[in-house]
Amino acid sequence: MNLNDAIGHASTIFMPEFLFGADEAMLKGEQAANEEALHLLIEEYFANPNPSYGFDLVTELAERNRSLCDMMGPENVQADRSRNLANHLSDDDILRGVAALQHRRTETVAKEVAGMNATKGVLYGSKPAKGTFVGIDIETTSTSPDRGYIVNVGWELMELADGAEPTDAHTVFCGLPDQYAETGVPLSEIHHITWNDVAGKKPFREDADLQKELLKVLKKYPFMAHNAAFEDSWFTLHLDGYAEARKEGKIVPIDTRDICRALDPEVRFLSWEAKPASLEAWAQRRGVLASDEAERHLGLDDTDLMFRTLIAELKERNLLANA
């Protein structure tokens, strides 16, 4: 599939009734075509200053794919991972994030990197962190943003300062299609969100007030998340206006997992199986969680845990502006 094919595929009128009774191979073929087209369209949108389509073409195709996945059942949706979930933020995103953390110009940070071939540890540790940021975490029904739904989102503001307390905390449960009342909420074994939590709630994509409020705060403050590429990928396909603002540089994601890997020297000495850069393990090493305590896997709880662990790490490295 090339870009023109992807635009044509996304532009076709989707009639779900034509797929009722289709065999598994046909459904999977349609899903594969949808996700390949999404990948090409997203890539082109961010690379081309003047793409020939609006991003609503992308979000509408993602909606179409979710409806298809609902027809196929969660056991098929979870079988693999979509290409439309990014593994990490880009190098340019890392530079912008460091600049936001240290209240410096991105160009200045980029010149420093070019001049000394700096590692991420040197980059994050070159200046103290300061300022106010929004922390955010979401819980979802899939690892793939073009297949599942956001069922919980939590965020709060935090100044990066010793002894700071979070402000403006929000937590919202979001609804699902009615079929999940029978099948149960996917990934509930991780986040423990059940149908009772989401019954009667507006789905994230249909909650205009939530979307407006969330986009506003993400444009006002750089946002932090542990594995921020996950939130970034999901908001790209679920939060109206996010992709456009992201492309214009009005939204700056910062990955605290990347900060953990860069600054915490213990990470490199622990086995991969121990998941040393996970939020839970990081919080336990910094004494924010006891060794027998577990991460909650709920949006606001994990956001708060992330902020407290980050401040403990920065304090440990003498990287708080007022420390």
Image: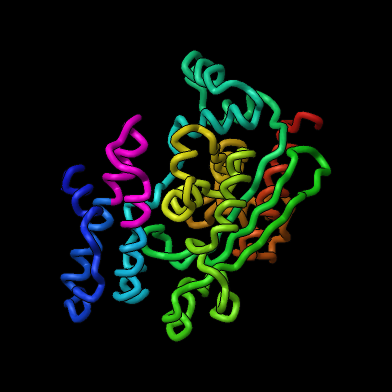
The picture quadrant where one finds residue 68 is bottom left
Residue 118: percent from the left, percent from the top?
Answer: 51, 22
Q: On screen, 280 above or below 104?
A: below
* Colouring chosen for the image of the structure: rainbow
Residue 226 higher or lower than 201, as above or below: above
Residue 195 in percent (x, y) is at: 54, 80
Question: As drawn, which residue projects farthest toward the bottom?
Answer: 182
For image coordinates 77% across by 50% down, the residue present is 167
Q: Is residue 99 above or below residue 6?
A: above
Image quadrant where one finds the C terminus = top right
Residue 265, percent from left and from top: 61, 39
Tell me which corner region of the image, top left, top right, bottom left or bottom right, holds residue 12: bottom left
User: In the image shown, does 174 or 322 lie closer to the viewer?
Assistant: 174
The verdict on residue 24 being magenta is no
Q: Residue furthest right?
A: 163
Is 92 left, or right, of 305 in this rendering? left
At a point 68% along the width and 44% down the height, the residue shown is: 310
Magenta segment main secondary structure: helix
Foreground residue, 140 or 305?
A: 140
> Which image quadrant is residue 138 in?
bottom right
Would residue 301 appear left or right of 74 to someone viewing this image?
right
| Residue stretch in magenta | 38-61
x then y, percent, for residue 200? 56, 77
Quick one: 154 or 188, which is closer to the camera?
154
Which residue lies at the image location 41% right of the left edge and 47% below the top edge?
A: 87
- Left or right: residue 58 compared with residue 110: left
Q: Is residue 56 magenta?
A: yes
